[in-house]
Image: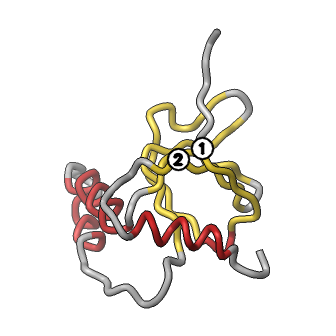
Amino acid sequence: MSKTDALLVDLATLVESGRSNQMSLTVVTGGTVITGRLAPEAVWRERVSEVLADSVQLGAFAAVFTEDRPADGPPRHLHFHVARILQGTVGIPETGGMYRVAIEDVSAWTVGDFSYSDN
């Protein structure tokens, strides 16, 4: 996007103001569709740190995500929790992942997430 979508920034700001991860959103970024729930950055960082800390190979990286960073203006990223990249008729990964997307890179979005059914 050449100009950041003010409405999307407002949504991200509202998510950042609380500790809820219940806002569902689907975005298109770089031709990829990502669907899931938004989380405040602090909650997202905490969860990523926990996952990394539990890994023998990646545990050393956990500390990067626990560093406090002061907010310097409106949010510039969306932090997805329990999110999937949509590929054909499946979501990858099936269980959901943790994604960080620059708001300025979002070319389209809609409130709500997509889910799949075998029916």
Quadrant of the frame with the C terminus = top right
Q: Which corner quadrant of the image does residue 14 belong to?
A: bottom left
| Crowdedness near tag 2: few (<14), some (14–19) or many (≥20) residues, C-alpha within 10 Å | some
Q: Residue at x 75, y 59 (%)?
A: 108
Which label's residue is closer to the chain start, 1 or 2? 2
The residue drawn where x is 70% and y is 60% is 29
How far from the left and from the top, in percent, is residue 44?
A: 35, 60
In this picture the colour scheme is secondary structure
Gap in angstroms between the C-alphas marked 1 and 2 = 5 Å
Q: Which mark is residue 25?
A: none
For the residue pair 117 and 12, the one nearer the viewer reads as 12
Q: Amino acid at mark 1?
A: Gly
Query: Farthest residue toward the bottom?
Result: 72
For numbered disc 2, what is the local secondary structure? Answer: strand
Name which residue lies at 24% across and 71% down.
66
Q: Where residue 55 appears, x then y in whole percent?
A: 24, 50
Which numbered disc covers residue 24?
2
Q: Name the spot of residue 31 as percent of width and height, x first.
A: 77, 56
In this rendering, the answer to whether 25 lies above or below 6 is: above
Q: Residue furthest top?
A: 119
Camera-nearest residue between 39 and 84: 39
Q: In the figure, is residue 43 to the left or right of 92? A: left
Q: Is residue 5 left or right of residue 21?
A: right
Look at the picture and state if 116 lies above or below 24.
above
Residue under pointer 1? 112
**Mark 1 touching mark 2, by CB under 8 A?**
yes
Quadrant placement of the N terminus? bottom right
Near-viewer residue (16 or 86): 16
